[in-house]
Image: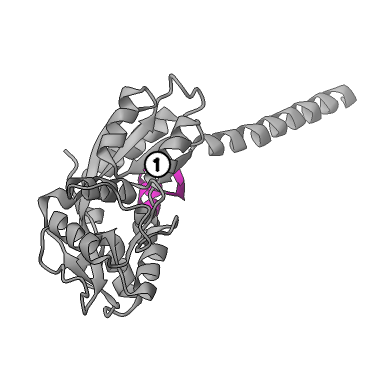
Amino acid sequence: MGNYRKSVLLIGMVLTLVVLVAFPATAADKVLMMATTTSTDNTGLLDYLAPHFTKATGIALKWTSVGTGKALKLGENCDVDVLLVHAPPAEKAYVEKGFGVDRREIMYNDFVIIGPDSDPAGIKGKSVVDALATIRDKKAVFASRGDNSGTNKKEIALWKASGKAVPEKEPWYVQTGQGMLATINIAAERGGYTMTDRGTYIKYADTLKGNPPLKVLVEKDAILLNQYSVLAINPKRCAQAKYDLATAFSDWMAGAEAQTLIRDFKLLGKPLFVPNAK
């Protein structure tokens, strides 16, 4: 009888160890690591979507918000499983190089140029190319993120589209090396201009009770479209990448529930993003 009880005790201890080891592993397998842009984080969109995603899939979503350039690098280094970014040319090159797979467009907003209500350079209502040319000619203060983010990549492309080189060595061109909200605040302090995505601008305006010192002066130019997409990290390059969880996230973001949630996400009565998954 004593041997029987010892055997039962030993089996119980083994089963307990199996449970203790198995459950943490299972929990870890259900955590999806994402690198994303500052705009999806700063606006509060991810805090709004994440609980719904977890409820629908059982997958916990954790993310780090950086500029798109840094987000792409995190994926290249196999530090995350999935990306939510907004620099289509860079994303497509990323897929061609084999770092990412299954790029899927999810939502968009647009870029706007903002500045003081007094508009010292006189850019209000101009096309974006003419507005930047005017800012350059008048040497008006312009705050650039200067961080290789999706917004910074777009801004650089727009300076080039205005017909001249990026004014990175000009004293009136301030490269902050910081995120969008910080850059907006620096522009406001200097009485200057900057370019931001509309979602972050609405968040900025909301924090100031709808009366921010910087106003939208240039907008609704076709070239200012700001597309956001999901990319899974290529599991053939990163063996530890949780491709199945990344796919589940991409499918959910493109599905009816998430697309409706994105559509209904508003501040000051204004939508921050427009869903457009196919």
- Point out residue 54 in the picture as x, y percentages from the top left corner: 41, 47
Residue pictured at 32% horizontal, 67% vertical: 141
Callout 1: SS = helix
Question: In the image, is residue 254 above or below residue 127?
Answer: above
Residue 260 located within the stretch drawn in magenta: no
Location of residue 232 by image quarter: top left
State which quarter of the image contains the N terminus.
Answer: top right
Residue at (74, 31) in percent of width and height: 12
Q: Is residue 57 magenta?
A: yes
Q: Is 38 left or right of 272, judged from the image as shown?
A: right
Q: Amino acid at mark 1?
A: Gly
Q: Quadrant of the C terminus?
A: top left
- Residue 254 lies in what quarter of the image? top left
Could you say which is closer to the camera, residue 189 or residue 94? 189
Which range is magenta? 49-66
Q: x, y percentage for residue 78?
A: 50, 31
Q: How is the image coloured?
A: one colour
- Residue 194 to residue 25: above or below: below
**205 left or right of 25 in image:** left
Q: Which residue is mark 1?
A: 69
Q: How many marks?
A: 1
- Give coordinates of residue 89: x percent, y percent: 26, 36
Residue 129 visible in this rendered orientation of the protein: yes
Residue 259 seen in this snapshot: no
In percent of width and height, residue 154 lies at 26, 47
Residue at point 16%, 67% (across, down): 123
Q: Nearer the viewer, residue 132 or 83?
A: 132
Callout 1 environment at 10 Å: few (<14), some (14 to 19), or many (20+)? many
Question: Quadrant location of residue 229?
Answer: top left
Q: Which residue is the extreme one toward the top?
A: 236
